[in-house]
Image (spheres, helix red, strand yellow):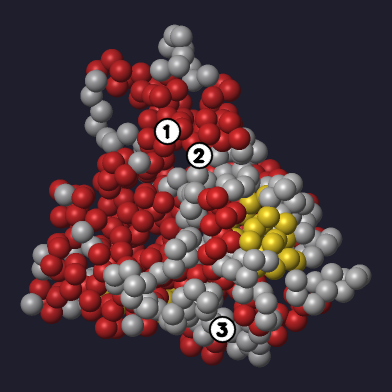
Amino acid sequence: MPPWNPILGNLITLAKLRKYGPADTRQAEAFALLSTQIPGLEDGFYIDAWPFSIPLLAVTSPKLAIQACQNHDLPKPHALQPFINPMAGGSDNLFVSNGSRWRQMRDRFNHGFSLTAALGHMSCVLEEAEVFVQMLKAHARVGDTFSLDQLTCRYAMDIIGNIALNTRFRYQQENNPIATAMRDIIELECGIETTNIVKRWSPRRLYIQWKSGRTLNNLIGIELDKCYRKWKEDKITSISSRPKSIMDIVIAEYMKTRPQEDQHLDPEFRAWAVIQIRLFLFVGHDSEASSIIYCLYLLSKHPEMLARVREEHSKVFGAGAASALEVLKRRPEMVNQLPYTNAVIKETLRLFPPANGMRGGLPGVSLRDEDGTLFPTEGCGIWIVHAAVHRNPSSWVQPHSFIPERWLVEEGHPLYPPTGGWRPFEHGPRSCIGQSMSLMGIRATLAVVVRQFDFHDQYAEYDRLDPSTGINEMFGERAYMIQKGAGHPAHGFPCKVTLRDSLEEAA
Protein backbone atom coordinates (compact mmCIF):
# COMPACT_ATOMS: atom_id res chain seq x y z
CA MET A 1 0.00 0.00 0.00
CA PRO A 2 1.18 3.57 -0.65
CA PRO A 3 1.73 5.77 2.42
CA TRP A 4 -1.39 5.52 4.59
CA ASN A 5 -2.99 7.87 7.07
CA PRO A 6 -5.19 6.44 9.87
CA ILE A 7 -7.82 9.11 9.24
CA LEU A 8 -7.52 9.91 5.53
CA GLY A 9 -6.30 6.55 4.28
CA ASN A 10 -4.57 6.99 0.91
CA LEU A 11 -6.39 10.18 -0.05
CA ILE A 12 -3.30 12.31 0.62
CA THR A 13 -1.18 10.15 -1.68
CA LEU A 14 -3.83 10.24 -4.40
CA ALA A 15 -4.09 14.02 -4.11
CA LYS A 16 -0.33 14.36 -4.60
CA LEU A 17 -0.58 12.57 -7.93
CA ARG A 18 -2.07 15.74 -9.38
CA LYS A 19 1.42 17.21 -9.27
CA TYR A 20 2.59 14.72 -11.89
CA GLY A 21 -0.20 14.85 -14.45
CA PRO A 22 -3.10 16.90 -15.83
CA ALA A 23 -5.95 17.59 -13.42
CA ASP A 24 -8.50 15.87 -15.66
CA THR A 25 -6.50 12.77 -16.57
CA ARG A 26 -8.12 9.38 -16.01
CA GLN A 27 -7.66 7.68 -12.66
CA ALA A 28 -6.25 4.67 -14.50
CA GLU A 29 -3.34 6.69 -15.86
CA ALA A 30 -2.77 8.23 -12.43
CA PHE A 31 -2.64 4.76 -10.88
CA ALA A 32 -0.25 3.62 -13.60
CA LEU A 33 1.98 6.53 -12.68
CA LEU A 34 1.68 5.71 -8.96
CA SER A 35 2.81 2.12 -9.57
CA THR A 36 6.15 3.47 -10.89
CA GLN A 37 6.59 6.28 -8.34
CA ILE A 38 6.80 4.20 -5.15
CA PRO A 39 9.04 1.11 -4.89
CA GLY A 40 7.17 -2.11 -4.19
CA LEU A 41 4.01 -1.27 -6.11
CA GLU A 42 5.12 -2.78 -9.44
CA ASP A 43 2.77 -5.79 -9.30
CA GLY A 44 -0.18 -4.47 -7.30
CA PHE A 45 -1.21 -2.47 -4.27
CA TYR A 46 -4.16 -1.69 -2.04
CA ILE A 47 -5.91 1.69 -2.05
CA ASP A 48 -8.01 3.02 0.82
CA ALA A 49 -10.11 5.85 -0.63
CA TRP A 50 -12.98 5.71 1.85
CA PRO A 51 -15.60 7.22 1.75
CA PHE A 52 -15.35 7.65 -2.04
CA SER A 53 -14.91 4.00 -2.98
CA ILE A 54 -14.73 0.50 -1.60
CA PRO A 55 -11.24 -0.81 -0.76
CA LEU A 56 -9.38 -1.44 -4.01
CA LEU A 57 -6.66 -3.87 -4.98
CA ALA A 58 -5.03 -2.25 -8.01
CA VAL A 59 -3.51 -4.93 -10.25
CA THR A 60 -0.61 -3.58 -12.30
CA SER A 61 1.20 -6.70 -13.53
CA PRO A 62 0.27 -9.46 -16.01
CA LYS A 63 0.81 -12.20 -13.42
CA LEU A 64 -1.79 -10.88 -10.99
CA ALA A 65 -4.18 -9.99 -13.83
CA ILE A 66 -4.06 -13.57 -15.13
CA GLN A 67 -4.89 -14.90 -11.67
CA ALA A 68 -7.81 -12.51 -11.16
CA CYS A 69 -9.50 -12.96 -14.56
CA GLN A 70 -8.41 -16.39 -15.74
CA ASN A 71 -7.20 -18.66 -12.96
CA HIS A 72 -9.89 -17.63 -10.46
CA ASP A 73 -12.38 -16.01 -12.86
CA LEU A 74 -13.54 -13.68 -10.13
CA PRO A 75 -17.04 -12.17 -10.48
CA LYS A 76 -18.01 -8.66 -11.48
CA PRO A 77 -18.47 -6.57 -8.29
CA HIS A 78 -21.64 -4.78 -7.29
CA ALA A 79 -19.64 -1.52 -7.34
CA LEU A 80 -19.74 -1.56 -11.17
CA GLN A 81 -23.49 -1.18 -11.33
CA PRO A 82 -23.74 2.56 -10.49
CA PHE A 83 -21.47 3.27 -13.47
CA ILE A 84 -22.89 0.83 -16.05
CA ASN A 85 -26.58 0.67 -15.18
CA PRO A 86 -27.48 4.28 -16.16
CA MET A 87 -26.28 3.55 -19.69
CA ALA A 88 -27.81 0.05 -19.82
CA GLY A 89 -31.02 1.03 -18.07
CA GLY A 90 -31.01 -1.90 -15.65
CA SER A 91 -28.83 -4.37 -13.77
CA ASP A 92 -29.93 -7.44 -15.77
CA ASN A 93 -27.27 -6.84 -18.39
CA LEU A 94 -24.41 -8.86 -19.82
CA PHE A 95 -21.71 -6.62 -18.37
CA VAL A 96 -22.45 -6.77 -14.63
CA SER A 97 -24.36 -10.06 -14.28
CA ASN A 98 -22.72 -13.14 -12.76
CA GLY A 99 -23.21 -16.88 -12.42
CA SER A 100 -25.81 -18.83 -14.37
CA ARG A 101 -27.65 -15.68 -15.44
CA TRP A 102 -24.51 -14.31 -17.09
CA ARG A 103 -23.76 -17.66 -18.78
CA GLN A 104 -27.30 -17.79 -20.17
CA MET A 105 -26.93 -14.30 -21.66
CA ARG A 106 -23.46 -14.96 -23.02
CA ASP A 107 -24.66 -18.13 -24.76
CA ARG A 108 -27.56 -16.22 -26.27
CA PHE A 109 -25.24 -13.63 -27.84
CA ASN A 110 -22.17 -15.70 -28.75
CA HIS A 111 -23.38 -16.48 -32.26
CA GLY A 112 -24.22 -12.85 -33.01
CA PHE A 113 -20.67 -11.76 -32.11
CA SER A 114 -18.73 -14.62 -33.71
CA LEU A 115 -15.94 -14.11 -36.25
CA THR A 116 -18.27 -15.22 -39.03
CA ALA A 117 -20.96 -12.81 -37.90
CA ALA A 118 -18.40 -9.98 -37.70
CA LEU A 119 -17.46 -10.42 -41.37
CA GLY A 120 -21.14 -10.63 -42.24
CA HIS A 121 -21.55 -7.14 -40.83
CA MET A 122 -18.82 -5.63 -43.00
CA SER A 123 -21.40 -4.10 -45.33
CA CYS A 124 -22.89 -2.22 -42.35
CA VAL A 125 -19.46 -0.88 -41.39
CA LEU A 126 -18.72 0.22 -44.94
CA GLU A 127 -22.06 1.99 -45.29
CA GLU A 128 -21.14 4.20 -42.38
CA ALA A 129 -17.47 4.47 -43.41
CA GLU A 130 -18.55 6.01 -46.73
CA VAL A 131 -20.35 8.73 -44.79
CA PHE A 132 -17.32 9.17 -42.50
CA VAL A 133 -15.12 9.73 -45.56
CA GLN A 134 -17.53 12.35 -46.90
CA MET A 135 -17.54 14.18 -43.56
CA LEU A 136 -13.73 14.19 -43.50
CA LYS A 137 -13.62 15.47 -47.08
CA ALA A 138 -15.93 18.32 -46.11
CA HIS A 139 -13.56 19.33 -43.29
CA ALA A 140 -10.58 19.02 -45.63
CA ARG A 141 -12.20 21.37 -48.16
CA VAL A 142 -12.98 23.98 -45.50
CA GLY A 143 -9.65 23.54 -43.71
CA ASP A 144 -11.22 24.08 -40.29
CA THR A 145 -10.24 22.75 -36.87
CA PHE A 146 -12.80 20.29 -35.56
CA SER A 147 -13.18 17.68 -32.82
CA LEU A 148 -12.12 14.33 -34.25
CA ASP A 149 -13.46 12.72 -31.07
CA GLN A 150 -16.95 14.06 -31.63
CA LEU A 151 -17.01 13.11 -35.31
CA THR A 152 -15.64 9.61 -34.70
CA CYS A 153 -18.05 8.95 -31.82
CA ARG A 154 -20.92 9.75 -34.16
CA TYR A 155 -19.42 7.45 -36.81
CA ALA A 156 -18.96 4.56 -34.37
CA MET A 157 -22.50 5.05 -33.03
CA ASP A 158 -23.81 4.71 -36.58
CA ILE A 159 -21.85 1.48 -36.98
CA ILE A 160 -23.19 -0.16 -33.82
CA GLY A 161 -26.76 0.96 -34.56
CA ASN A 162 -26.49 -0.62 -38.00
CA ILE A 163 -24.95 -3.83 -36.67
CA ALA A 164 -27.11 -4.24 -33.57
CA LEU A 165 -30.48 -3.21 -34.98
CA ASN A 166 -30.13 -2.92 -38.78
CA THR A 167 -31.01 0.74 -38.25
CA ARG A 168 -29.33 3.66 -40.00
CA PHE A 169 -29.05 6.33 -37.29
CA ARG A 170 -27.36 8.78 -39.72
CA TYR A 171 -25.92 10.42 -36.62
CA GLN A 172 -22.89 11.67 -38.54
CA GLN A 173 -25.11 13.98 -40.57
CA GLU A 174 -27.78 15.01 -38.08
CA ASN A 175 -28.96 14.39 -34.55
CA ASN A 176 -30.66 11.06 -33.96
CA PRO A 177 -32.88 10.73 -30.86
CA ILE A 178 -31.49 7.32 -29.84
CA ALA A 179 -27.84 8.28 -30.34
CA THR A 180 -28.31 11.73 -28.81
CA ALA A 181 -30.00 10.32 -25.70
CA MET A 182 -27.19 7.81 -25.19
CA ARG A 183 -24.49 10.45 -25.60
CA ASP A 184 -26.33 12.74 -23.16
CA ILE A 185 -26.31 10.01 -20.51
CA ILE A 186 -22.62 9.26 -21.13
CA GLU A 187 -21.67 12.94 -20.88
CA LEU A 188 -23.41 13.20 -17.52
CA GLU A 189 -22.12 9.87 -16.21
CA CYS A 190 -18.49 10.54 -17.13
CA GLY A 191 -18.12 12.32 -13.78
CA ILE A 192 -19.36 9.34 -11.77
CA GLU A 193 -15.76 8.36 -10.89
CA THR A 194 -15.05 11.75 -9.42
CA THR A 195 -15.54 12.75 -5.79
CA ASN A 196 -17.89 15.62 -6.67
CA ILE A 197 -20.91 14.54 -4.64
CA VAL A 198 -22.89 17.69 -5.50
CA LYS A 199 -22.54 17.02 -9.22
CA ARG A 200 -23.29 13.33 -8.81
CA TRP A 201 -26.66 14.02 -7.16
CA SER A 202 -27.55 17.12 -9.19
CA PRO A 203 -31.34 17.25 -9.84
CA ARG A 204 -30.63 18.40 -13.39
CA ARG A 205 -28.37 15.41 -14.02
CA LEU A 206 -30.88 12.97 -12.56
CA TYR A 207 -33.73 14.48 -14.61
CA ILE A 208 -31.82 14.33 -17.91
CA GLN A 209 -30.75 10.79 -17.12
CA TRP A 210 -34.38 9.79 -16.50
CA LYS A 211 -35.68 11.60 -19.59
CA SER A 212 -32.96 10.21 -21.87
CA GLY A 213 -33.54 6.73 -20.46
CA ARG A 214 -37.24 6.92 -21.30
CA THR A 215 -36.39 8.03 -24.83
CA LEU A 216 -33.99 5.13 -25.29
CA ASN A 217 -36.40 2.54 -23.92
CA ASN A 218 -39.26 3.76 -26.10
CA LEU A 219 -37.36 4.12 -29.38
CA ILE A 220 -35.23 0.98 -29.01
CA GLY A 221 -38.42 -0.91 -28.20
CA ILE A 222 -39.91 0.30 -31.49
CA GLU A 223 -36.82 -0.89 -33.37
CA LEU A 224 -37.06 -4.30 -31.66
CA ASP A 225 -40.68 -4.59 -32.75
CA LYS A 226 -39.50 -3.95 -36.31
CA CYS A 227 -36.92 -6.74 -35.91
CA TYR A 228 -39.63 -9.08 -34.71
CA ARG A 229 -41.92 -8.26 -37.64
CA LYS A 230 -39.00 -8.76 -40.00
CA TRP A 231 -38.30 -12.16 -38.41
CA LYS A 232 -41.91 -13.21 -39.04
CA GLU A 233 -41.77 -11.98 -42.64
CA ASP A 234 -38.46 -13.73 -43.31
CA LYS A 235 -39.87 -16.92 -41.81
CA ILE A 236 -42.66 -16.86 -44.38
CA THR A 237 -40.65 -15.76 -47.43
CA SER A 238 -37.21 -17.16 -46.49
CA ILE A 239 -35.80 -14.03 -48.13
CA SER A 240 -33.84 -11.29 -46.41
CA SER A 241 -32.51 -8.25 -48.24
CA ARG A 242 -29.99 -7.26 -45.54
CA PRO A 243 -27.56 -9.05 -43.24
CA LYS A 244 -29.07 -10.17 -39.95
CA SER A 245 -28.44 -7.78 -37.09
CA ILE A 246 -27.36 -8.98 -33.67
CA MET A 247 -30.92 -8.68 -32.42
CA ASP A 248 -32.28 -10.46 -35.51
CA ILE A 249 -30.10 -13.41 -34.55
CA VAL A 250 -31.04 -13.26 -30.86
CA ILE A 251 -34.76 -13.01 -31.62
CA ALA A 252 -34.54 -16.00 -33.95
CA GLU A 253 -32.73 -18.04 -31.27
CA TYR A 254 -35.22 -16.95 -28.60
CA MET A 255 -38.23 -17.90 -30.73
CA LYS A 256 -36.90 -21.45 -31.00
CA THR A 257 -37.68 -21.80 -27.29
CA ARG A 258 -41.25 -20.46 -27.58
CA PRO A 259 -44.10 -22.97 -27.78
CA GLN A 260 -45.92 -20.78 -30.30
CA GLU A 261 -45.44 -17.62 -32.32
CA ASP A 262 -47.00 -14.56 -30.65
CA GLN A 263 -48.51 -11.57 -32.40
CA HIS A 264 -46.15 -9.29 -30.47
CA LEU A 265 -42.71 -9.77 -28.99
CA ASP A 266 -42.91 -11.15 -25.45
CA PRO A 267 -42.86 -8.07 -23.12
CA GLU A 268 -40.40 -9.59 -20.65
CA PHE A 269 -37.96 -10.53 -23.41
CA ARG A 270 -38.49 -7.15 -25.07
CA ALA A 271 -37.60 -5.27 -21.86
CA TRP A 272 -34.52 -7.42 -21.39
CA ALA A 273 -33.44 -6.91 -25.01
CA VAL A 274 -33.76 -3.11 -24.66
CA ILE A 275 -31.28 -3.23 -21.77
CA GLN A 276 -28.77 -5.21 -23.82
CA ILE A 277 -29.10 -2.88 -26.83
CA ARG A 278 -28.48 0.13 -24.61
CA LEU A 279 -25.37 -1.63 -23.27
CA PHE A 280 -24.13 -2.44 -26.78
CA LEU A 281 -24.71 1.12 -27.99
CA PHE A 282 -22.59 2.38 -25.10
CA VAL A 283 -19.64 -0.01 -25.07
CA GLY A 284 -19.85 -0.80 -28.79
CA HIS A 285 -19.26 2.72 -30.02
CA ASP A 286 -17.33 4.38 -27.19
CA SER A 287 -14.20 2.25 -27.10
CA GLU A 288 -14.03 1.76 -30.86
CA ALA A 289 -14.19 5.49 -31.53
CA SER A 290 -11.38 6.18 -29.06
CA SER A 291 -9.20 3.45 -30.57
CA ILE A 292 -9.65 4.74 -34.13
CA ILE A 293 -8.61 8.24 -33.05
CA TYR A 294 -5.50 7.06 -31.24
CA CYS A 295 -4.44 4.91 -34.21
CA LEU A 296 -4.64 7.98 -36.47
CA TYR A 297 -2.86 10.10 -33.85
CA LEU A 298 0.06 7.73 -33.40
CA LEU A 299 0.46 7.13 -37.13
CA SER A 300 0.52 10.88 -37.74
CA LYS A 301 3.35 11.15 -35.19
CA HIS A 302 5.35 8.35 -36.85
CA PRO A 303 5.46 8.97 -40.63
CA GLU A 304 7.65 5.94 -41.32
CA MET A 305 5.06 3.64 -39.77
CA LEU A 306 2.24 5.42 -41.57
CA ALA A 307 4.09 4.87 -44.86
CA ARG A 308 4.38 1.17 -44.08
CA VAL A 309 0.65 0.91 -43.34
CA ARG A 310 -0.17 2.66 -46.61
CA GLU A 311 2.18 0.37 -48.52
CA GLU A 312 0.49 -2.68 -47.00
CA HIS A 313 -2.93 -1.36 -48.00
CA SER A 314 -1.79 -0.69 -51.56
CA LYS A 315 -0.52 -4.28 -51.86
CA VAL A 316 -3.72 -5.79 -50.48
CA PHE A 317 -6.35 -3.48 -51.99
CA GLY A 318 -4.55 -2.20 -55.07
CA ALA A 319 -3.55 1.31 -56.14
CA GLY A 320 -5.85 4.24 -55.57
CA ALA A 321 -6.53 5.94 -52.28
CA ALA A 322 -10.19 4.85 -52.21
CA SER A 323 -9.75 1.31 -53.52
CA ALA A 324 -10.16 -0.43 -50.14
CA LEU A 325 -13.85 0.43 -49.92
CA GLU A 326 -14.79 -1.36 -53.14
CA VAL A 327 -12.51 -4.34 -52.48
CA LEU A 328 -13.94 -4.88 -49.00
CA LYS A 329 -17.49 -4.70 -50.34
CA ARG A 330 -16.70 -7.65 -52.59
CA ARG A 331 -14.30 -9.52 -50.33
CA PRO A 332 -14.75 -8.57 -46.66
CA GLU A 333 -12.32 -11.29 -45.55
CA MET A 334 -9.48 -9.18 -47.01
CA VAL A 335 -9.65 -7.05 -43.85
CA ASN A 336 -7.90 -9.92 -42.07
CA GLN A 337 -4.88 -9.80 -44.41
CA LEU A 338 -3.28 -6.73 -42.85
CA PRO A 339 -0.66 -7.97 -40.36
CA TYR A 340 1.18 -4.67 -39.94
CA THR A 341 -2.05 -2.70 -39.60
CA ASN A 342 -3.16 -5.18 -36.96
CA ALA A 343 0.15 -4.68 -35.15
CA VAL A 344 -0.42 -0.91 -35.18
CA ILE A 345 -3.87 -1.40 -33.67
CA LYS A 346 -2.61 -3.73 -30.95
CA GLU A 347 0.20 -1.37 -30.04
CA THR A 348 -2.23 1.56 -29.96
CA LEU A 349 -4.53 -0.35 -27.63
CA ARG A 350 -1.54 -1.17 -25.43
CA LEU A 351 -0.61 2.49 -24.98
CA PHE A 352 -4.17 3.84 -24.91
CA PRO A 353 -6.49 1.13 -23.57
CA PRO A 354 -9.99 2.63 -23.55
CA ALA A 355 -11.23 0.71 -20.50
CA ASN A 356 -10.05 -1.34 -17.52
CA GLY A 357 -11.03 -4.59 -15.86
CA MET A 358 -12.93 -4.86 -12.59
CA ARG A 359 -13.55 -7.96 -10.50
CA GLY A 360 -14.83 -8.64 -7.00
CA GLY A 361 -12.78 -10.36 -4.31
CA LEU A 362 -13.87 -13.59 -2.64
CA PRO A 363 -13.16 -15.18 0.76
CA GLY A 364 -10.17 -17.48 0.66
CA VAL A 365 -8.92 -16.17 -2.71
CA SER A 366 -5.52 -14.48 -2.76
CA LEU A 367 -3.31 -13.38 -5.63
CA ARG A 368 0.44 -14.06 -5.49
CA ASP A 369 3.12 -11.89 -7.08
CA GLU A 370 6.55 -12.87 -8.40
CA ASP A 371 8.11 -12.57 -4.94
CA GLY A 372 5.48 -14.77 -3.32
CA THR A 373 3.64 -11.90 -1.65
CA LEU A 374 -0.03 -12.72 -1.11
CA PHE A 375 -2.81 -10.23 -1.85
CA PRO A 376 -6.04 -11.34 -0.14
CA THR A 377 -9.06 -10.26 -2.18
CA GLU A 378 -11.96 -10.59 0.26
CA GLY A 379 -13.87 -7.33 0.64
CA CYS A 380 -11.99 -5.61 -2.19
CA GLY A 381 -12.79 -4.42 -5.63
CA ILE A 382 -10.01 -5.72 -7.87
CA TRP A 383 -9.13 -3.11 -10.46
CA ILE A 384 -7.04 -4.47 -13.32
CA VAL A 385 -5.45 -1.19 -14.38
CA HIS A 386 -4.78 -1.79 -18.07
CA ALA A 387 -2.70 1.36 -18.47
CA ALA A 388 -0.38 0.09 -15.71
CA VAL A 389 -0.25 -3.53 -16.91
CA HIS A 390 0.44 -2.35 -20.48
CA ARG A 391 3.22 0.03 -19.41
CA ASN A 392 4.78 -2.09 -16.66
CA PRO A 393 8.56 -1.67 -17.10
CA SER A 394 9.16 -5.10 -15.55
CA SER A 395 7.15 -6.73 -18.35
CA TRP A 396 7.68 -4.59 -21.44
CA VAL A 397 10.80 -3.37 -23.24
CA GLN A 398 10.52 0.40 -23.85
CA PRO A 399 7.04 0.40 -22.31
CA HIS A 400 6.14 3.96 -23.30
CA SER A 401 7.33 3.73 -26.91
CA PHE A 402 5.10 3.07 -29.92
CA ILE A 403 6.66 -0.07 -31.46
CA PRO A 404 4.20 -2.05 -33.65
CA GLU A 405 7.00 -4.48 -34.50
CA ARG A 406 6.72 -6.04 -31.04
CA TRP A 407 3.60 -7.82 -32.37
CA LEU A 408 5.45 -9.29 -35.34
CA VAL A 409 8.61 -10.71 -33.74
CA GLU A 410 9.11 -14.35 -32.80
CA GLU A 411 8.94 -15.66 -29.26
CA GLY A 412 12.29 -15.18 -27.55
CA HIS A 413 12.89 -11.77 -29.11
CA PRO A 414 13.40 -9.01 -26.50
CA LEU A 415 10.34 -7.16 -27.83
CA TYR A 416 8.06 -10.21 -27.66
CA PRO A 417 4.97 -9.36 -25.54
CA PRO A 418 4.73 -10.92 -22.08
CA THR A 419 2.13 -13.61 -21.47
CA GLY A 420 -1.13 -11.99 -20.43
CA GLY A 421 0.37 -8.52 -20.76
CA TRP A 422 -2.05 -7.21 -23.41
CA ARG A 423 -5.56 -6.92 -21.99
CA PRO A 424 -7.67 -4.18 -23.65
CA PHE A 425 -10.53 -6.68 -24.08
CA GLU A 426 -9.53 -8.69 -20.99
CA HIS A 427 -8.94 -12.44 -20.99
CA GLY A 428 -10.78 -15.40 -19.59
CA PRO A 429 -14.50 -16.26 -19.68
CA ARG A 430 -15.47 -12.61 -19.12
CA SER A 431 -13.43 -11.25 -22.02
CA CYS A 432 -15.25 -8.70 -24.20
CA ILE A 433 -17.78 -10.50 -26.39
CA GLY A 434 -17.51 -7.81 -29.08
CA GLN A 435 -13.74 -7.77 -29.54
CA SER A 436 -13.79 -9.42 -33.00
CA MET A 437 -16.41 -6.93 -34.17
CA SER A 438 -14.47 -3.99 -32.74
CA LEU A 439 -11.10 -4.98 -34.22
CA MET A 440 -12.70 -5.59 -37.61
CA GLY A 441 -14.31 -2.14 -37.52
CA ILE A 442 -11.02 -0.45 -36.63
CA ARG A 443 -9.10 -2.30 -39.37
CA ALA A 444 -11.76 -1.50 -41.95
CA THR A 445 -11.81 2.18 -40.97
CA LEU A 446 -8.04 2.51 -41.24
CA ALA A 447 -8.14 0.73 -44.60
CA VAL A 448 -10.67 3.23 -45.89
CA VAL A 449 -9.16 6.48 -44.57
CA VAL A 450 -5.37 6.32 -44.10
CA ARG A 451 -4.53 6.53 -47.82
CA GLN A 452 -7.05 9.30 -48.44
CA PHE A 453 -6.22 11.71 -45.61
CA ASP A 454 -3.49 13.17 -43.48
CA PHE A 455 -4.49 14.00 -39.90
CA HIS A 456 -2.91 16.87 -37.99
CA ASP A 457 -3.63 17.38 -34.31
CA GLN A 458 -4.13 21.03 -33.36
CA TYR A 459 -3.14 20.91 -29.70
CA ALA A 460 -0.61 23.70 -30.24
CA GLU A 461 -3.36 25.95 -31.58
CA TYR A 462 -5.68 24.89 -28.75
CA ASP A 463 -3.07 25.72 -26.11
CA ARG A 464 -2.38 29.08 -27.73
CA LEU A 465 -6.06 30.03 -27.66
CA ASP A 466 -6.71 28.53 -24.23
CA PRO A 467 -3.42 28.66 -22.32
CA SER A 468 -3.08 26.72 -19.08
CA THR A 469 -0.43 26.88 -16.39
CA GLY A 470 -0.92 23.27 -15.32
CA ILE A 471 0.62 20.06 -16.66
CA ASN A 472 -0.90 19.13 -20.01
CA GLU A 473 0.85 15.83 -20.80
CA MET A 474 0.77 12.30 -19.44
CA PHE A 475 3.52 9.84 -20.37
CA GLY A 476 4.78 12.49 -22.77
CA GLU A 477 1.51 12.58 -24.74
CA ARG A 478 -0.53 15.76 -25.23
CA ALA A 479 -3.52 13.64 -26.27
CA TYR A 480 -3.70 12.08 -22.82
CA MET A 481 -6.80 10.13 -21.83
CA ILE A 482 -9.71 11.58 -19.88
CA GLN A 483 -12.72 9.71 -18.55
CA LYS A 484 -15.69 10.16 -20.87
CA GLY A 485 -17.42 6.81 -20.64
CA ALA A 486 -14.39 5.02 -22.02
CA GLY A 487 -11.04 6.80 -22.13
CA HIS A 488 -11.00 9.55 -24.76
CA PRO A 489 -8.37 12.06 -25.88
CA ALA A 490 -8.26 15.32 -23.96
CA HIS A 491 -10.18 18.32 -25.29
CA GLY A 492 -11.92 16.26 -27.97
CA PHE A 493 -8.74 15.89 -30.04
CA PRO A 494 -8.73 19.19 -31.98
CA CYS A 495 -7.77 18.27 -35.52
CA LYS A 496 -7.32 19.37 -39.10
CA VAL A 497 -7.46 16.95 -42.00
CA THR A 498 -6.07 17.29 -45.52
CA LEU A 499 -6.67 15.23 -48.64
CA ARG A 500 -3.68 13.38 -50.03
CA ASP A 501 -2.63 13.60 -53.66
CA SER A 502 -4.51 10.73 -55.31
CA LEU A 503 -2.18 10.79 -58.32
CA GLU A 504 0.81 10.30 -56.06
CA GLU A 505 -0.95 7.39 -54.37
CA ALA A 506 -1.79 5.77 -57.70
CA ALA A 507 1.81 6.08 -58.80
Q: Which mark is residue 247?
A: 1
Residue 374 visible to an observer of this rendering: yes
1 or 2: tag closer to the N-terminus: 1
Local packing at callout 2 (Cα closer than 10 Å; few below 14, some 14-19, many 20+) is many
3 or 1: tag closer to the N-terminus: 1
Q: Which mark is residue 473?
A: 3
356 or 503: nearer the eye?
Answer: 356
| Relative to 93, residue 228 above or below | above
Q: Which mark is residue 120?
A: none
Q: Amino acid at mark 1?
A: Met
Instruction: Identify the residue under disc 2.
Output: 277
Q: Look at the numbered disc 3 and give the secondary structure of its residue.
A: loop
40 or 499: nearer the eye?
Answer: 40
Q: Look at the numbered disc 2 and give the secondary structure of its residue.
A: helix
Q: CA distance from mark 1 to mark 2?
A: 8 Å
Q: What's the residue at 83%, 74% (across, down)?
A: 4
Check if mark 1's residue and mark 2's residue have beta carbons within 8 Å.
Answer: yes
Local packing at callout 1 (Cα closer than 10 Å; few below 14, some 14-19, many 20+) is many
Q: Quadrant of residue 151?
A: bottom left
